[in-house]
Image (tube, grey):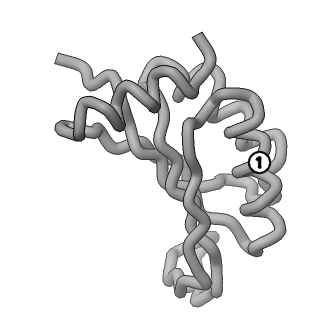
Amino acid sequence: MSPSMVVVLITVPSQETGEAIAHILVEKGLAACVNLVGPIRSLYAWEGNINDEQEFMLIAKTRADLFADQLVPAVKALHPYQVPEIIALPILMGSPEYLDWIQASTRP
């Protein structure tokens, strides 16, 4: 069974970039809520190097059916990274009222 709601994790290079992406996602109804967390420290492999960078994390709550065709392109249009982290994790359980709010707060 495919989950109907997901939490999307998106790393960004700055608070300003995170605020811009979060605002667009909520404004366009692609996410009901986006938390901006950070700064965080990210260690990752890229182009043969190990990088150690300060980033910020967006945590978006949305419907699974909005992820691939709408949310991902919206993030990529504003994101400065060549390969941004945009991953969805299923919400297996949640309070019925909160899940109803996600449904009501995102575009039909």
The residue drawn where x is 54% and y is 83% is 40
Q: Against 23, is 36 above or below?
A: below
**Frontmost residue, 24 versus 49:** 24
Query: Quadrant of the image for the N terminus?
Result: top left
Q: Is residue 71 left or right of residue 61?
A: right
Up/down of 50 relative to 62, above or below? below
Q: Position of residue 54 (x, y in %)?
A: 64, 86
Q: Residue at x 19, y 37 (%)?
A: 92
The picture quadrant where one finds residue 74 is top right
- Is residue 7 toward the left or the right of residue 40 in the image? left
Compare residues 21 and 54 and report the one nearer the observer.
Answer: 21
Quadrant position of residue 38: bottom right
Total marks placed:
1
Front residue (pair 31, 101): 101
Give the quarter of the figure containing the C terminus. top right
Residue at the disc numbered 1: 23
- x, y percent for residue 42: 52, 81
Which residue occupies 70% across, 39% down? Answer: 25
Judge from the rendering whether residue 78 lies leftward or rightward of residue 64; answer left or right. Answer: right
Q: Residues within 10 Å of mark 1 (few under 14, many from 20)?
A: some
Q: Residue furthest top?
A: 108
Q: Residue at x 63, y 35 (%)?
A: 72
**Residue 51 screen position, x and y as percent:** 59, 85
Dot 1: what SS? helix
Comparing 63 with 2, the one in front is 63
**Can you give x and y, in whole percent of width and height, for residue 41 in the image?**
53, 87
Q: Amino acid at mark 1?
A: His
